Image (cartoon, helix red, strand yellow):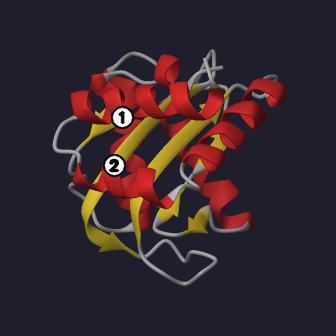
Amino acid sequence: MRLVDLLSENVIKVPLERTDKVGVIEELIDLLEKSGKVKDKESVLKAVLEREKVMSTGVGDGVAIPHGKADGVEDVVAAFGISHKDIDFQSIDEKPVRLVFLLVAPPNATGPHLKALSRVSRLLNKKEFRDRLLRAKTPAEVLELIQEEEKVYFEI
């Protein structure tokens, strides 16, 4: 599963407008809804926020990967946002977040969901790549950077 296959320019936002955790999650879910990838926005939002209550998905190094499983989607879907302002995500390293990668899967898609989460984590673990993403100005540029990085990192 390639992340570039889950993303398109209409589900990438640069910059994010909201600066609070719930607001950013809502903003990314709105992108998915507008793109037709989410059929029940409320169930998706509820699933992601419930998962967030268990433990923050602010994984450190300025990255958050909010995720959940919901009936509101038919397949694994993703949205990505870059903030120009710090977002308090209650991250494990207690540092603010600027890169937010949202993943949502149907309840029966545990394997693909975990594979996508793992891929996002591994890709965003590289500081140089995170720095390049933070300099991106457009969704097209973000998509191109992810595509290039996946080719190098995963030898597609």
Label 1 sits on what residue type? Leu
Q: Quadrant of the C terminus?
A: top right
**Residue in view at x 32 percent, y 27 percent:** 144
Label placed on residue 119? none
Q: Is residue 69 visible?
A: no
Give 72 or 150, whichever is nearer the viewer.
Answer: 150
**Along the line of sight, which residue is nearer the eye, 57 or 122?**
122
Q: Which residue bears the numbered disc 1?
A: 145
The amino acid beneath tag 2 is Leu
Coordinates of residue 88 in the picture (x, y in percent) = 42, 76
Residue at image coords 59%, 81%: 93
User: Quick one: SS at disc 1?
Assistant: helix
Q: Give x and y (percent) for residue 68.
A: 66, 43
- Answer above or below: position of 104 versus 67: above
Query: Which residue sits at x=37%, y=55%?
Result: 24
Q: Answer whether labels 2 and 1 touch (C-beta < 8 Å).
A: yes
- Structural distance between the alpha carbons of marks 2 and 1: 7 Å
Q: Which residue is tagged 2?
A: 133
Label 2 secondary element: helix
What residue is at 62 percent from the left and 61 percent from the top? 57
